[in-house]
Amino acid sequence: MAADQSSFPLPKARFAPQWLVGALSAFALVASLALLWLRVSRAEFQDLLAYLLLSAALSIAAGYAAYRWAESGRRSIRTKILLAYGVGVGIVIVNILVTAQLMFLSSHDLSLLILLLVFGSVLSVSIGTSIAGRMTTAVRQLAEGAQRVSSGDLHTRVDVTTNDELAELAMSFNSMVQNVSESETRLRKAEESRRDLIAAVSHDLRTPLTAIRAMLEALSDGVVDDPATVRRYHETMRVQVSHLAQLIDDLFELSQLDAAPESFELTPADLTAAVRESTETLAMSTSARNVAIRFHADEPAPAQLDTLRIARVIGNLVENAVRHAPDDSQIDVTVRRNGDQAEVLVEDRGPGIAEDDLDRIFSRFYRGEKSRSRTHGGAGLGLAIARGIVDHHGGAIWAENRASGGARFIFTIPIAD
């Protein structure tokens, strides 16, 4: 489809100055050579100036006429280049023939000169045709590629082999399409994540709210009046409200990680000491099923830390390990240095992680269990929050299965000098 020419105005204002500069430059060059090199007489110099003025005027007129004709309609690049070659060759031939006449060459010599000019003209036009053909092919490939992209084919790539600005344009075109394709992929994934997030939040809000409403209605209608049952209902509602409060806190933490990375207060601190303090606090508060938490470290690990958020990471990982650890087992928390990184390991003796889940457990609202029952864990945000915090510290986090059984979570933080 042809582009609207109104969107691409012709450079009329630039044509005349370019031709005038070329004509004036040629005029000055020839006049200077005549004076300094040939040392012509004054009379010959005046005749030369007159001839040059006449030739320049006719050449500019011919060039401008060709330019206006080329831009008056839809002409191909090949046609315009060949037209430029033709005008240039024509100007040279006319000047040579006029010069030959002024030199009073014989008819035989003039015929030989004309034959040589014909040979040179055909050769020049042939070279111009070859160059114009390659340029036209490159431009046509770019146009076809743009049309495919406009039709939605973001896998389109243009292969232009010319070693000029058209090749650079093709590289820029391919880079642009690649960026658009990646942006489209990110947008599609973001939309899928948004839908999953809404569905997950809706489920995790609706389930406890439904239970609380049912128990409140039972209490207000007098359906339940046994003191023991009333206390049990109150305790259940308290637990459900705690779940809701935790979910809201987690959502707020995620929004902070996404929207306000400047809220991190990174200061010089010892990662080993921060992890030890968090582990000791968790060990004192964790007594369910007699699961012991053991801390291991050999040396300090200085780093730039937001210690409160690092404590949140340790808490989430340890709580996840406790949730899946068998009764009367042990959870090991280890800090060690590995080159310019400090590694923190949280290991349990549970059933481990399914291979299909290893790359997905850090996704928001993802649970390994297909049912979304809270008996299997929280809202599925703890590991996502841990990953976000570690990312903002310039580290990495991943999970793997231990050879002897159980899961191992590892995250790294860069060591500070």
Image (tube, rainbow, N blue to C red):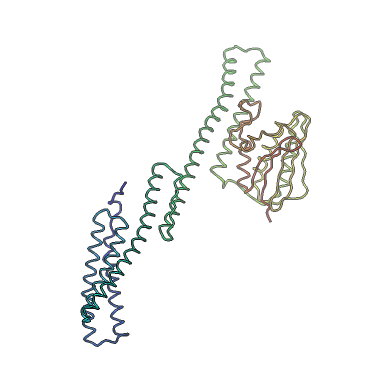
Give coordinates of residue 72: x percent, y percent: 23, 56
- Above or below residue 12? Residue 92 is below
Q: Which residue is drawn at 51% across and 38% down?
A: 189
| 73 lies left or right of 166 | left
Marker count (numbered):
0
Of 246 and 71, which appears nearest the observer?
71
In the image, taking residue 45 as reference, residue 400 lies left or right, namely right
Q: Residue 134, image x and y in percent?
A: 38, 58
Residue lying at 26% horizontally and 86% vertically, measured from the top left:
40
> What residue do we see at 27% from left, 53% from top?
74
Q: In the rendered image of this protein, does residue 130 appear above or below residue 7?
A: below
What residue lies at 67% left-to-right and 45% top-to-bottom?
A: 307
**Residue 405: which quarter of the image?**
top right
Residue 321 picture location, percent across and down: 71, 34
Residue 108 left/right relative to 405: left
Query: Image quarter for residue 401?
Result: top right
* Quarter of the rendering occupied by the C terminus: bottom right
Q: Which one is in front, 155 or 120?
A: 120
Q: In this view, does 224 lie above or below 252?
A: above
Expressed as whole percent of the image width and height from the top left, the position of residue 167 reads 43, 57
Closest to the observer, 362 or 291 = 362
Q: In this view, does 86 lie to the left or right of 200?
A: left
Question: Looking at this rendering, what residue extends furthest in the front direction?
Answer: 108
